[in-house]
Each structure stands twice: as C-alpha cells, then as structure tokens.
Image: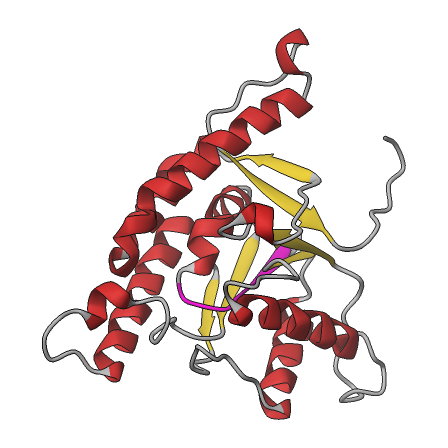
Amino acid sequence: MTPSKTALVISAHAADFVWRCGGAIALHAEMGWNVTVVCLSFGERGESAKLWKQTGMTLQKVKDTRRAEAERAAVALGVHDLITFDLGDYPLDMTRDDKNRLVDVMRSVQPEFMLSHSQYDPYNSDHMYTTQVVLECRSTAQAWGHNPGQKILGAPQLYLFEPHQTEQMGWKPDTFLDITPVWERKRAAIESMEGQEHLWEFYTRVAQNRANHFQRNSGGQAGGRASKYAEGFQSVFPRTVDVL
C-alpha cells in the first residue's frame, strides 16, 4: 500500500487552523492525506473574551472549553492527528525543549508542505512569533547533526495563511485554493468555535472574497473556473516545477 501523503499545520491558538486553513485541511483529508495540526496554545487568555465574561470562569475552564472546541473542529475537518502543546498565550513563548518537540513532530510527520501564520502581525505577536519558530525549527529539522539517527526533514514548502487584518500584515497571497467542495465541513468547524462566534460570518465572507480571486486568476470571465469559497496562501520558498 502506498503511504498517505502528509501535511502539517502549526497554529498559535486553538482556532487559528479553523479560520485560516480549515478548507485546505478538509480538502486534503478527503483526498486521503494525513493532516497533522499542532496547536501551540488554546488561546485561553487572549482569544476567549466571550468565555471570560461568564460568571465564575477560571483559566482551566477556558482551556478545557477551547480544547473541546478544537477537538470538535478537528473531527469536522478530518484532521489525522491534533497535537496540543498547551504553552499558554498572550504572550506565547517557547523553550528550547518546546522547539525540539516541534522539530520531532516535523521529522515524524515528514510533511509535503506546512502551513502557519503571516511573518508580520502587529496586532498579534503570538502569530508572527509562531512563524519565526516554525522557520527556525524547519531549519533544525533539516540538520543532520541534530539528533543523529532520526530521519531528517526534506524541504517542505511553508505556506502562510491569511491573517485577520490582511492589509496591515504585508501578506501577499500567491496561491488560491478552491475549497467549495468541502465548505460545509469548514463551516461546521467554524461553528465549533463557540467562544469566538463573532468571527463566524467574518471568515465566511473572507472565503467568498477569495473565491472571487480564485476565479479571476484562473481565467476570469474568459473561462475562469467558478468557485464559491476559497482560501489564499503565501509561499515562503521558491517552488520547483517541470512545467508552468
């Protein structure tokens, strides 16, 4: 049997993988890929305002709620493995041991590609810190002298998914993915994130807008492929191709 292809998502908080690349996860899962998602934190401090407004709320209750939301979303999207580091957020900080753990995940998964945040985000330092760490760990995972005997990482593309306030982030998409066939799965995952209900319709509109860009860049009115929902990504590294 041919081994399944793999992909790896590194999400700063429990909901980021849903809003920003849930369609990519579901689409590849339906094609038989094993998609692993790493959540570095649950977003319990900075991304759970709705929960904190409830009487008697505690940090552990918020974390438990956000964990359950992430688990439901992962099931809806067909995630192969959801790994939670539980490192805390606002601020997110990683020790050398935490980074080495992420290196181990990269080497274990051997992803064809990885997905993470934009490299600049003045509204959320956790996001850009995550991608800084991902790039560092990607380099370490490629080093033959790091934990000799482990299979080293190759050179997977790192795609940066769309930030919340795109215009402020220097994020420039060069790849659009039609997620129309799996939109209902992404919407179900979105609705799993009850602690951030105010974002449900926002990210639905983002997907609809990116569908317009997908159609325009696939040929526009002169034969472009129709799309109702899409996601945009920015690649970090050059892509190697045999044909254009």
x 25%, y 75%: residue: 62
From this viewpoint, which residue is outermost toward the top?
A: 222
Which residue is found at the position 54% from the left and 18% from the top?
Answer: 226
Q: Is residue 9 magenta?
A: yes
Residue in view at x 24 percent, y 56 percent: 194
Q: How is the image coloured?
A: secondary structure
Which x, y percent locates residue 79? 45, 57
x, y (%) of residue 54? 13, 70
Q: Does 44 appear in magenta?
A: no
Is residue 3 or residue 203 the one in the foreground? 203
Where 7 sits versus 95, above or below? Answer: above
Q: Is residue 117 above or below residue 138?
A: above
Toward the viewer: 138 or 58? 58
Give residue 108's position: percent from left, percent from top.
64, 73
**Between residues 232 and 91, which one lies in front from this camera angle?**
91
Q: Nearer the viewer, residue 16 or 110?
A: 16
Q: Dividing the picture into quarters, in which one does residue 183 lie?
A: top left
Q: Which quadrant of the view contains residue 89?
A: bottom left
The stretch of residues the image draws in magenta is 5-14
